[in-house]
Image (cartoon, helix red, strand yellow):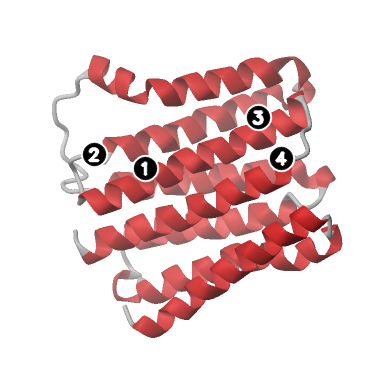
Amino acid sequence: MKNKNIIWLYIFLFASILHLSFILEGLDTYRFYSKPLILLSLTIYFYQISKPISWTLLSKATMGALIFSWIGDILLMWENLFVYGLGAFLMAHICYIIAFKIGQRNPGKIGDINFVKTFLRNLPIYILAAFTYYLINPHLGPLKIPVIIYIIVIVSMATTATERYGKCNPESFWQVFIGAVFFLISDSMIAINKFYQPFEEAGIIIMGTYCIAQLLIVMGIRAHLIKP
């Protein structure tokens, strides 16, 4: 993991800040140039640092998540392609679920599961998802089934991140977990803004939390690769 690869992180941060600035200034046209660069640079960064283990399922699943996210970013720039963007991010979350399952010690081991403890640990995630669905449900129309499926998958992604507690190094766990929570918040804001009540700060909140989410997840996977 050579230091020269950090240039892609700087490009990611620059593109993210630039994109958020375009949102604040209402420069919608320029956002078509800045948005694709955000995930593209982060994907290249992960590809570069994961070359030594590029053949592993963990690397392939994470790369898949980043690529599907990049495709989703592009599709969501057009309102009429929303459902396709939703499908792309659905695939991204499935890839992250696989990566989170594998990115822990003894991933294939089946141990004792305390269902009550697991439920209580994930309760805030369930509440956020349920509250979001409660708000948007009356306005979903023909998208109701796809949105329900998407909610189930993203909740599964977030809860899978919590399962890594004690099964990987703390740095990796907290970065991935907080990133997953930010991802859930970002998607909740998209749903509320689109299906419940549009609000002025939606763009900056959605993209701000989204950029943080993707960066933290990638850095969390990186931490697992460095200190398994």
User: Sequence-wise, which precedes: disc 4 or disc 1?
Assistant: 1
**Whole-percent x and y of residue 197?**
77, 26
Mark 1 Cα shell of 10 Å, populated few (<14), some (14-19), many (≥20): many
Residue at (61, 23) in percent of width and height:
132
Under circle 2, the secondary element is loop
Q: Is residue 68 visible?
A: yes
Q: Are marks 2 and 1 in contact (CB under 8 Å)?
A: yes
Q: Is residue 35 left or right of residue 187?
A: right
Residue with the mark numbered 1: 177
**Mark closer to the chain start, 4 or 2:** 2
Calculate the distance from the C-alpha at mark 2 to the C-alpha at mark 1: 9 Å
Q: Nearer the viewer, mark 4 or mark 2?
A: 4
Is residue 103 something one can see in this rendering? no
Query: Secondary structure under badge 4?
Result: helix
Query: Which residue is disc 4 drawn over?
Result: 202
The quadrant holding residue 11 is bottom right
Label 4–label 1 contact, CB within 8 A:
no
Rendering coords of residue 52 (x, y %):
29, 75
Q: Which of the two discs, 2 and 1, labels the residue nearer the N terminus? A: 2
